[in-house]
Image: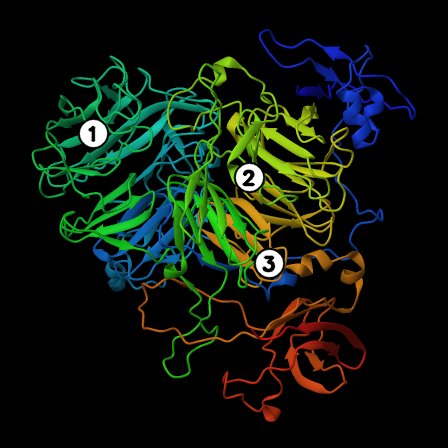
Amino acid sequence: MVHISRVVSSLSIVVIAAGCTAAPKALSVSPGHDEPAIARRAEADAVAPLDQTLRRASASASETRVARTVASTHPLTQPSGHPLARPLTRTDLRDFAFRPIGPANMGGRVADLAFAPGNDATFYVGFATGGVFKTTNRGTSLSPIFDDQHTGSIGAIAVADAPESWPGWADDDAIEDRAEAGKGKIVWVGTGEGNNRNSSSWGHGVYRSTDGGGSFEHLGLEATHNIPQLAADPRDPDVCYVAALGPLWNESSDRGLYKTTDGGATWSNVLAIDNTTGCCDVVLDPDNPDTVYAAMYTRIRTAWSYTSGSEQGGIYKSTDGGATWTKLTNGLPNRTSRIGMSIHRSDPRILVAVVASDEGGWGTEPFDNFSRVGGVFRTEDGGETWERVSPLAPRAFYFSRIAIDPVDPDRVYLPGWTVYTSDDGGRTFANATNKKPHVDIHAFEINPDDTDHLLMGTDGGIYQSFDRGSTWQYIDSVAAGQFYNIGVDLSEPYRVAGGLQDNGTWMAPSRTMWNSGPDPFMGTGNVGVTNHDWRFISGGDGFGVAFELGHPEGEHDYFYSESQGGYLGRVDLTTGERRQLRPSPKEGEQAFRFNWNAPFFISPHDHTTLYLGGNHVFKLTQRGERWVKISPDLSTQVVEKITTVGSDAETHGTLVSLAESELAAGLLWAGTDDGRIHLTSTDGGSWTDVTPDTVAGRYISKIEPSRFDRDTVYVAIDGHRSGNYQPTVLMTEDAGATWTDITGDLPAAPAGGCVKVVREDRQNPNVLYCGTERGLFVTLDRGGHWMSLSGGPEGQVDHGPTLPPVPVDDIVQHPRTLDLVVGTHGRSIFILDDASFFGQCTPEVLDADLHAFETQPARPRLEFWYDGFYGDNFFTAPNPAAGAQITYFVKEDHYDGASIKIADSAGNTVLTLSGPGRAGLHRVAWDLQADPKTRIVDPAVGVEFVDPGAYTVKVTIGDDLESETSVEVLPLR
């Protein structure tokens, strides 16, 4: 029998008297619940040891009033009670860099594409959560151009010429040069994708570049959140229309069609309907841009549902630049959902639209491509009348794009699961991609100057065709993967694996054998991890991953991965044997519920035992061959929130975080998507609800038990699914009896936002890492101060190691190397090699004039030149520097550089290196070789490494500053 007890909160702070021994109070439960009564925890439980508290919670109770355990709003100070003497800054870390390792085999979701006018070699790519990239050579190489902004969530891009009369020209711009220089000069970017996924991010309004993407200015409209389309007036690049769909997760008046006539200095909402209806598309008549067509769309998402469609939506037309509007109804459905439009460039009276409608009901199953009333519509009289030419309208909330050939009015492209093409004006469609490119097409562009040239953006990246879609070229040089979860093993080099949105599970080594320096003969260099090093493991949407670390080396190589809805699987990477492990109820029992991103892990105490979270906690033994349900339903069990149909994206009332203490077997913590936190110290024998009021029903995105104290746990909370975009990190030091808010100065959006993951440093319990919707943060004092390690306006050149400003969904610190491995939802995986210095940054260290950090053991590494040739479209990620990484801290600037003397155990100097003397942290690599003057090259390996053993490292600056550390050199193998 499983028992649940609960901490119940009131509205006042009660001082708990020491020695109180009152028993918990028994409470009734909701009708029909087949679990034992839920008990309240008494006053004494707030201060009782964990085991005593849980024993009491599972006993029969007498009635006693309960005191509230309150989350403090004050950030923690250090255990010593004083703040850091000298805070660590980003500038201190300017010598350090995150190392991207890919993969680029698959890109992330592409939200929009745009050609530069008059230059088909230049185009822009907007990723849903990966920023903006630009190519000037038809995709041979692409570069990120938006990483110095607040967000990587992109919805739309519009590129316009700057005419000779444009007032934005500088006075010294020669008039005779403006015609050429003005081509594609203006780039508008609308942030926040408009594809309405449960994992969609939100943006930060509108940006504009007046130098072809070289730099951007933020122009407001932050509250619109999601901008799926832009339309720039070709006559005047200071005039732009913004299709603002508005927040996905809450009602808001910040939606509709916005217009600026002064380059974004001011905005007018020229078409507003209501607080749930926004604009999903806008097109201009190319001959008369004052004629505007806008598609309006009603939609709202909750954690358990997606609602769309209304009679307020539809296609609206203005002939006076948005001053007045007419709703177009002749031939169109009365009730519409998402709409996509395209206007024919040669004859603007012709438009095609894909219109979703639920009139008459949807199809015969949830993913039916055909609509009973909606479909593809066509007008040849500027929208006065419309003809329904096809019922095809694939998964409207996620796609709803359409494109008509600028020259041939009968050639129509309809992106969806694949790209459908029509040569009869949209009446019949054929599959244009022949199942070769990735599914789920969100962006599609036709080169206006060469209609054979097509661009296509999918859930798996960028494609282009030069023959109207008969064949497709995949651009696999951009690492824009959307990872949910990552994991590492203990190999050398260790392997990294992770699950990606719509791209399954992949695995690669953290580094390769290729030389980390330039080839002196060929000029190529630093070929580290490439696409060829990434290995596909399993399909679906990829989520949790875990390597089994305890089996004898070489005997088996067990790896676990998961796809959406709790579909957990095991594969032996040695033999290829696979096994599905998802628990299923017996016939006649209630169905189990599993979240889109269901949590699981291998027990740190038994490598053959796993735990998996659904609406119950499941314990899987014998590597998943046996399972048992060890908890009741731990959600709030609100019936109307758990009965959705579809892809598992809205399955609700489920566990989304699950963890076991490394210090106590069977001490489990569980968090749900509807805001409940439970724990058990008896491996599921009894459960205690320890949810503080401050959670307020929000999503418990991650629970991190401390490795230093069994009663200490950190909790990351993400409230955006209920319209709360503020960051929250909580900590308990008494097993949930009381909670402290350690959010501190962790910024809200746009710089930070909702918290997706929190991790404790492996060396220092005061050091925490936090992943948010906008990047990575670190605190050295348990939330007293958080420092950003991601990009944005404040994180540029000379300001430390910066990740792109994209969601960080998972963080792992490697247990041996102490590398910080970061899984982003938009730019794949990054590694900060040997991040042990964070854990060593104590107040004493940061107050020292000079300090040499402890150095990780180092093994000589044989490297080889890359076997082959490659071009600029070849994805490669750098390897880390070989050898020992010597890290030191300098408190203040010194004109003298640092001298780093390495000596063997006999005191003989092996090598002297030099390093910077300016303030901050610095790292110098020693390749484990002696001074070149004394080396005798070993012909067997081509180099001479120093002997294994301990070496002293002495760092000095000038005559007065000196600090010493050591490094252990391991044998070559």
Image quadrant of residue 351? top left
Q: Residue at image x 32%, y 69%?
A: 870
Q: Amino acid at mark 2?
A: Gln
Q: Is label 1 in a helix, a strand or a loop?
A: strand
Mark 1 and mark 3: Cα distance apart in space: 51 Å
Q: Note whether residue 232 is visible.
A: no
Q: Which mark is residue 622?
A: 2
Q: Which mark is residue 353?
A: 1
**Label 1 or label 3, whichever comes before in sequence order:** 1
Q: Is label 3 in a helix, a strand or a loop?
A: loop
**In front here: 821 or 295?**
821
Label 1 crowd bin: few (<14), some (14–19), many (20+), radius 10 Å: many
**In front of the other: label 2 or label 3?**
2
Q: Are marks 1 and 3 in contact (CB under 8 Å)?
A: no
Q: In the image, residue 754 lies at what x, y percent?
A: 56, 37
Q: Is label 2 in a helix, a strand or a loop?
A: helix
Q: Amino acid at mark 3?
A: Asp
Mark 2 and mark 3: Cα distance apart in space: 31 Å
Question: What is the quadrant of the C terminus in the image?
Answer: bottom right
Q: Which residue is mark 3?
A: 819
**Label 2 or label 3, whichever comes before in sequence order:** 2
